[in-house]
Image (spheres, rainbow, N blue to C red):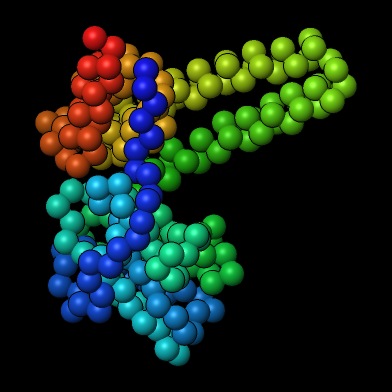
Amino acid sequence: MKKLIPFIIIASLIISCGKDHQGNMIVKGNIDGLKKGTLYLQKIQDTVLVSVDSVQLNGDSNFILSDNVESPELYYITLGEVSSEKIPFFGEKGEITITSKLDRLATSAKITGSANQLILDEFKEVYKKFNNQQLDLIKGKFEAMKANDTDAELAAEDAGKKLLKRRYLYTTNFAIQHADSEVAPFLALTELYDANIKLLDTINNSLTKEIKVSKYGVKLNNYIEEIKSYNE
């Protein structure tokens, strides 16, 4: 299977800045400790990270940003257009509130008002355990290699494969349980892009009609068709 990693950020462009916040998604919030600077609202568009709105802060850490959302998708708030630290959140129609601290922009962020974000947060809370276990296995394998302990190294590799399988199955089951949310195809595209095509098909077939025609629903179906065409 050809591994097609979605959402590769290859550039950053400005679409519009300083508009009158008339979009159907309003993002309000506060960055504690930020008194001066420019905040950007960004999203991925055709594999390119684009800025859809921005606001200059000067003495006030409160902000308002907006965009017209056709289908819920992942957005980012950044301090500086090409900043490496970003606050990711699932954008959707309505008002979303984001608060954070300047010294821990991404890790201290609190997001309310997005139903999809709540689902994504639920997934991430459990997913952290998989990441921690993977780090432990990597550490164990490295130590085994240093000690020339082949048995321990092979055991770590085997445990890693089993962990990956459990991670894939958890992600698949979570997506199926939330087949009426845009988070389902999003997780398939970002967490299962290199998994067995059967898992992707299972998620795709479980999606509701509304989600199938959403941005990520269409992307998932196209991705699956592309993989199948390579295997013909």
Question: Closer to the camera, 138 or 226?
Answer: 226
**120 up-or-down from 95: above or below:** above
Query: Residue 7 location, x and y as percent?
Result: 34, 43
Query: Residue 67 location, x and y as percent?
Result: 21, 64
**186 up-or-down from 50: above or below:** above
Residue at screen point 49% across, 25% down:
167
Residue at screen point 79% across, 10% down:
151
- Number of marks in the image? 0
Answer whether residue 173 is visible to the viewer in this image.
Answer: no
Side (left or right) of 140 relative to 36? right
Q: Quadrant of the C terminus?
A: top left
Name the residue furthest right. Answer: 147
Answer whether residue 138 is visible to the viewer in this image.
Answer: yes
Query: Residue 78 location, x and y as percent?
Result: 42, 66
Residue at screen point 58% across, 35% down:
131
Query: In terms of image quadrants, where is residue 54?
Result: bottom left
Query: In terms of image quadrants, where is residue 8?
Result: top left
Name the residue furthest bottom. Answer: 59
**44 up-or-down from 155: above or below:** below
**151 up-or-down from 9: above or below:** above
Q: Quadrant of the N terminus?
A: top left
Question: Closer to the camera, 173 or 69?
Answer: 69
Side (left or right) of 218 relative to 152? left
Residue at screen point 50% across, 41% down:
125
